C-alpha cells in the first residue's frame, strides 16, 4: 500500500484534525484512487475520514456500522458526549447554532463575513473558506443572553473550557470563535430543522439583543494590531527604562562627585583655635 495513506492516517490520529489545504488531505479529497486506499485502511479499523466542504479541517470518526459495538457494548447505549453534562451539551448546540448556521448561509450565498451587501455574481465564485465567513461571539453577550439557562457564569466558564480543550471552539480574548471540530462533528442536515423549528425556535425568532457577530478576519487583524502595539510598547518601555537608568547613574555619579568635592573643601579649611 501507499506510504502516503499510512502517513495521512497516522497524522490524523496524532493531531486529531488537519487543514483541508494540507498536501495529503488535498490529495485524499481530489485523488479518487488515493481516497479509496485511505478509506479501505480506515474501514479495517472501524474508522472513516470525516470531511465537510464547508469546514476548513478534516478529522476521523467511528464508522456508523461499528458504533453499536462500541457504544452498545453494555446494557445501555453509551453515548459519547465527551464528558459534557447536559448544560455543556446545550451550550455546544447554542454555539453551533449561533456560529455555524450563519456561516453556512454566507458560504451558500458566497458572501464573506464582512460583506455589507449581496454580490449579484456571487454564485459564480467558489465557496468561501470557513475562516473568511465564520463569526465570533462576545463572551459577555453569550453570558447575558444564555447564562441563566446554561448554569450561570461558573458552569458556563467550565463548559467553555472543556469545549475549547476538545477543539469545538477557540477563545480569543473575550471572543468565542469556531474551532476545527464544531462544523465537523455536528450533523447540520439533521440538526438544522430540529434546532431552528424546535429546541431553539425562540432564539431564532428573536435576534439576541447583545450577541454581535464579529468576522474572524477582523479578529485576526485586531489580534495582529494588538500584538504589534504590545511589541511597540515593550520596545518603548525598554528604551525609556534604559534612559531612566542611565540618567539615574549619571545623577548618582554627579552627587558622589559633589560630595567628594565638598569633603575636600572641609579638609582644607583649618579649624579656629580654641581661645579658652
Image (spheres, rainbow, N blue to C red):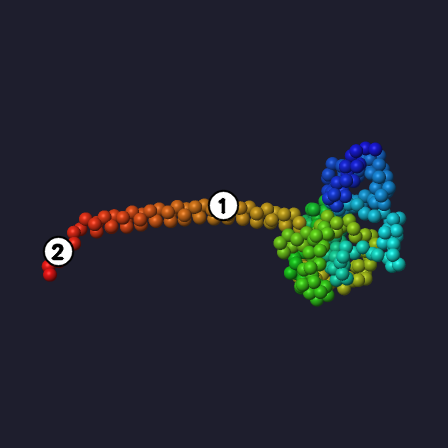
2 or 1: tag closer to the N-terminus: 1
**Element type at marker 2?**
loop
**Element type at marker 1?**
helix
Residue density around tag 2, few if under 14, some if 14–19, many if 20 or more, within 10 Å: few
User: How many numbered circles are shown?
Assistant: 2
Identified at 77% across, 40% down, the residue is: 10
Q: Is residue 118 visible?
A: no
Please provide percent x and percent y for residue 154.
67, 63
Residue 204: mark in rendering: none
Residue 235: mark in rendering: 1
Identified at 24% across, 50% down, the residue is: 263
Residue density around tag 1, few if under 14, some if 14–19, many if 20 or more, within 10 Å: few
Residue 273: mark in rendering: 2
Please provide percent x and percent y for residue 120.
73, 46
Q: Residue furthest bottom?
A: 148
- How far is mark 2 from mark 1, CA to CA? 62 Å
Residue 40 vertical position relative to residue 176 in the rendered view, above or below: above
Observer-nearest of 276 and 120 = 276
Q: Is residue 111 left or right of residue 258?
A: right
Which quarter shows the C terminus? bottom left
Observer-nearest of 139 and 71 = 71
Please provide percent x and percent y for residue 66.
87, 48
Amino acid at each position: 500500500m501507499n506510504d502516503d495513506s499510512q502517513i495521512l492516517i497516522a497524522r490524523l490520529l496524532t493531531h486529531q484534525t488537519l487543514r483541508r489545504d494540507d498536501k495529503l488531505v488535498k490529495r485524499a479529497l481530489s485523488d479518487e484512487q488515493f481516497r479509496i486506499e485511505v478509506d479501505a485502511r480506515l474501514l479495517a479499523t472501524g474508522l472513516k475520514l470525516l470531511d465537510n466542504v464547508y469546514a476548513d479541517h478534516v478529522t476521523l470518526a467511528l464508522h456508523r456500522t461499528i458504533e453499536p459495538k462500541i457504544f452498545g457494548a453494555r446494557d445501555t447505549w453509551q453515548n459519547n458526549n465527551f464528558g459534557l453534562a447536559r448544560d455543556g451539551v446545550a451550550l455546544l448546540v447554542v454555539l453551533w447554532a449561533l456560529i455555524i448556521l450563519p456561516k453556512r448561509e454566507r458560504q451558500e450565498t458566497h458572501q464573506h463575513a464582512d460583506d455589507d451587501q449581496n454580490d449579484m455574481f456571487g454564485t459564480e465564485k467558489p465557496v468561501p473558506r470557513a475562516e473568511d465567513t465564520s463569526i465570533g461571539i462576545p463572551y459577555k453577550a453569550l453570558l447575558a443572553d444564555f447564562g441563566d439557562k446554561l448554569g450561570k457564569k461558573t458552569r458556563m466558564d467550565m463548559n467553555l473550557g472543556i469545549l475549547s480543550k476538545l477543539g469545538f471552539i477557540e477563545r480569543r480574548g473575550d471572543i468565542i470563535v469556531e474551532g476545527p471540530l464544531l462544523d465537523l462533528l455536528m450533523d447540520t442536515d439533521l440538526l438544522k430543522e430540529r434546532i431552528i423549528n424546535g429546541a431553539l425556535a425562540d432564539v431564532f425568532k428573536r435576534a439576541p439583543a447583545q450577541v454581535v457577530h464579529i468576522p474572524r478576519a477582523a479578529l485576526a487583524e485586531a489580534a495582529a494590531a494588538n500584538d504589534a502595539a504590545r511589541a511597540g510598547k515593550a520596545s518603548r518601555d525598554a528604551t525609556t527604562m534604559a534612559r531612566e537608568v542611565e540618567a539615574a547613574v549619571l545623577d548618582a555619579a554627579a552627587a558622589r562627585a559633589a560630595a567628594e568635592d565638598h569633603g575636600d573643601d572641609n579638609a582644607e579649611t583649618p579649624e579656629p583655635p580654641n581661645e579658652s
